[in-house]
Amino acid sequence: MHRGLTGRMVAASVVLACIVGGAFAVVLIFITELRATTELRRQTREFLAAADSLEKRVVDLETGLRGFVVTRDESFLEPSNAARGALPATAQTLARRASELPIERARVHRILRALDDYVEVYAGPLVDAVRRGDPFARSVEHTIAAKHRVDALRAGLTGLRDAERVRLAARDADLERAAVRATAAAAFGIVGSIVLALGYVGYLSRVILRPLRRAAGMADRIAGGDLRARMPETDIGEIGALEHSFNVMAASLETSRDELASLAAEQAALRRVATLVAGGAPPAEVFAETAAEVRRLLGTDVAGLCRYEPDESVTVLALEADVPLGLSVGDRLTLEGESAMAAVYRTGREARVESYDRTSGSVATVARGGGLGTSAGAPIVVEGRLWGVVVVGVGGDTLPADTERRLGDFTELVATAIANAHTRDELNASRERLVTAGDDARRLVVRDLHDGAQQRLVHTIVTLKLLRHALRRGGETEPLVGEALANAEAANAELRELAHGILPAALTSGGLPAGIDTVVTRIKLPVDVDVPRARFASHVEASAYFVVTEALTNTVKHARATRAEVRCWVEDGMLHVAVADDGIGGARPDGNGLLGLDDRVTAQGGRLEIKSPPGGGTRVAVTLPLRN
């Protein structure tokens, strides 16, 4: 039944299309004729305008010529000359706009030849004759001849215009008849369309509108949030296709809603972990929260976070599990055999294992003990180095295809937390070293003062008291004076040596050049020095001085160098200090002296670099900000 109705609809549609198409074809023909007629009318107007312009030029030429012949006044030739100059262009336009009819083109060519004959054969020679004073040139015969020639030209142009107007009237009549035919055809097409449309109404009401109302009701349910609404796919043909498409759309919306909910849950989980990282939470807390969020988000049986060790094993740092694995935080597993953790360790990329039934190794044993079937892992990369892995596993089901990608979002946050903790640890260690170095320096100064200069001064005081007693009793005094003087000089020398370990007077009074010179003069090694004479902030000068002192001291003690150089320069708001030697190289950046210098320079916002390849000498370079 439906197929019969559909067939009749198709037949009626074909008839309607033919009727409407025919009507539109007739209208199109009319429009085409109208456009052609409009173009012909435009060409006719241009042709008539050219004919009128040519006639005006001829009249101006004849009038000026006649006035000159009668009066011999050259001013009469001005309009004649202007018309004569414009005649070629006007004649060319008239010839170009001439009708396509051969007869009309021939008439135009005859008029143009007569015009050329008038200008070249009659008008030009007549003007020359008048200028020579020929009395015959001013005769009435010449004037009348000129008028006859002009009248003949104007008559020819009038004939052209009349013929063109007749053709234009005929085209207008044809256009009117075409418009009447097109109107009738369009009216017939419209009436036929109305009749067929009325026939469609009953069919659409019974076969289409009812399913559409049902679809509208289902759409209302979907709009109200019930994405499980479905239409019964009982119809065939187009309505059946509509019902099927509606159900596909509803299923797609339901899937999209679930995906959006999953995405929102993923973003919320990432935000909670990111909040811990941004707040500087301890890594252990970040690890535990990451494992919990991953397991809750992905709905897995197991989620864990492990660190790779140098001996090709992993240490469990966080674990969330619903199945008995026999593992706890701090346990170690070896990486032999096939597992997601082993694959990540070998490749540095995401990996998964679909089954542990036929795999070996400690990880596989743990997985089988917990009934895990599929596992996936994503690498944790810290400062370009593979650090650990986040791994998940499930029992009977397989993991979704995007599991590794979703794990990767968490591993980036974990890597940031580890890097932040490492930076904090290094900063704290640097601060502790600075505090310890300060305490050690103070204790050393106290010890040196107590054991050296203070003892000398005490001895000097005792000797002076003995000298005073000897003076009162008239005893021998010269040995006591010598002894006191020797102790005082020794104490002064020891205080001077002690001061060298703090800041030399030359540095505080003369700046870097004077301070470095005091260092260079004390060592037995040729040193080339290139230091600017400018003064800098006291802490900058002190740091640069200690860098040079420590580097040259290491050179003398360990480098076996034959010479060294010290260069300082200012560039981009930074003081650059470089100390190089030609020694054996192999300097250790983690030595106490260089490590202390690194702490001092870093505390001022600078940077220390050491290059000391074996056999290639040593270069210590420091940059210190001049404003901080």
Image: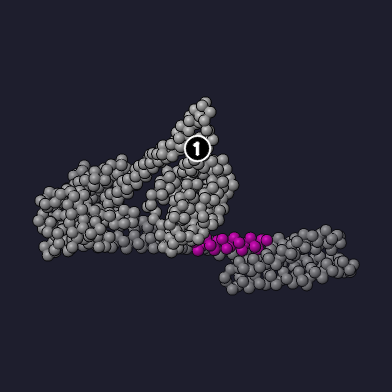
Coordinates of residue 405 in the picture (x, y in percent): 26, 55
Query: Farthest residue in the top direction?
Result: 472
Left or right: 72 with respect to 394? right
Residue nearest the observer in this picture, 51 or 316: 316
Read off the magenta span.
Answer: 35-53
How many numbered circles does the render carry? 1
Vertical side of 448 occupied by 102: above or below: below
Q: Residue at x 48, y 53 (%)?
A: 552
Dominant SS type (magenta): helix
Residue nearest the observer in this picture, 366 or 115: 366
The quadrant where residue 431 appears: top left
Residue marked by disc 1:
483
Residue 95 visible in this rendered orientation of the protein: yes
Q: Hey, what amino acid is under mark 1?
A: Glu
Please tell me how crowded label 1 is: few (under 14), some (14-19), or many (20+) other residues with Cα within 10 Å.
some
The quadrant where residue 454 appears: top left
Q: Residue at x 37, y 60 (%)?
A: 23
Left or right: 509 with respect to 220? right
Coordinates of residue 449 in the picture (x, y in percent): 43, 38
Vertical side of 71 occupied by 429: above or below: above
